[in-house]
Image (spheres, grey):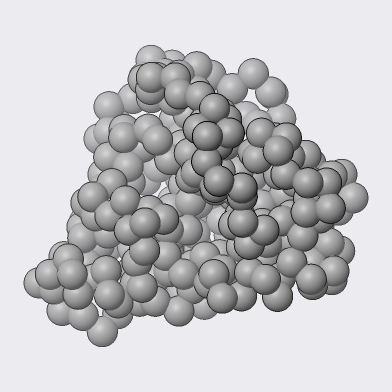
Amino acid sequence: MNRFLASLLLAGLAIAGCAAPAAKPDDAAAQVAALLPADAILLGEQHDAPEHQRIHREVIDALAARGVLAAVALEMAPRGGSTAGLPRDAGETAVQAALQWSDASWPWPTYAPAVMAAVRAGVPVVGANLPRASMRAAMAESELDALLPGPALKAQQQAIRLGHCDKLPETQVGPMTRIQIARDRSMAQTLAAVAAPGKTVVLLAGARHVDRRLGVPLHLPAQLHAKIVTLHAGAAPQDPRSVADVDATLITPPVPPKDYCAEMVARPALKASEPMKP
């Protein structure tokens, strides 16, 4: 399904729940750096907001300059891919190959600046998402349901319904929710694997993935100290829980509205193995 479909997010700057004017990218990087020390910083973006990907680059540059960036983990690439064996001057084609990047799923030009900034700094970039080949097996893995508390599981199921514009057959809601849980677990396992003492790994992912109530943070080891940063394009969050459950909220200018559900209606039937990309 369209990667931007579940982009319901908002614009301006609120840090730790306090509203403020919209942040410039360098200001945003400073705000994120102020959250250190942390074993991991989870940056939850709105995929169709270009300012968010610009903030990615600024954060990576800022943490690399401090010498504290352990690695950059990506929702946008499958777990198993890594640039660790590449030199700093590696070309973009080599980087894409190392990350097993699918430009059909994620536009490389959108994320290349942040990825290449890490490579140029000598910092490994790793894929963190569940590989597509593992998705069908995840759909049948009922044990995944138990990884979320009951209310969180119901919230994920409802998000799947809404993310697919209520067009997904109800029989597919449970299996598709399991894919989402498996993706969050894969990202958490990747963060734990690349964490380094005294340094910080940064995860770039959709905002729902970094939700403390139902996303990646639920699957992190208890000893891994993570900070959550959400990026909103348009207006400040209305749900007070979404502010309370993050360490920082960066509000950026709005993006033009787009009816992704209308796009979906015009598309062929959704494949059962195709997950929501919030």
Which residue is found at the position 12% from the left and 69% from the top?
91
Whether residue 241 is situated above or below residue 224 in the rendered picture:
above
For residue 126, above or below residue 56 = below
> Residue at coordinates 53% horizontally, 72% vertically from top-left?
131
In the picture, measured across the screen, residue 74 lies left or right of residue 152, that is left
- Measuring from the top left, give residue 235's x and y in whole percent: 50, 17
Q: From this viewpoint, which residue is outermost toward the left?
A: 89
Relative to 50, say whether 173 is above or below: below
Tell me if 214 is positioned left or right of 105 in this view. Answer: right
Can residue 31 be seen in this snapshot?
A: no
Q: State the residue lying farthest toward the right.
A: 150
121 to the left or right of 229: left
Q: Horizontal and vertical percent for residue 26?
A: 25, 35
- For the C terminus, which image quadrant? top right
Total count of labels: 0
What residue lies at 48% left-to-right and 45% top-to-bottom?
3
Image x and y of residue 82, in percent: 35, 76
Q: Residue at x 66, y 52 (%)?
A: 215
Q: In x, y percent, where is residue 65?
A: 21, 56
- In the image, taking residue 69 as reference, residue 10 lies left or right, namely right
Asked if residue 172 can be seen in this view, the reply is: yes
The residue lying toward the viewer, choosing from 110 and 201, is: 110
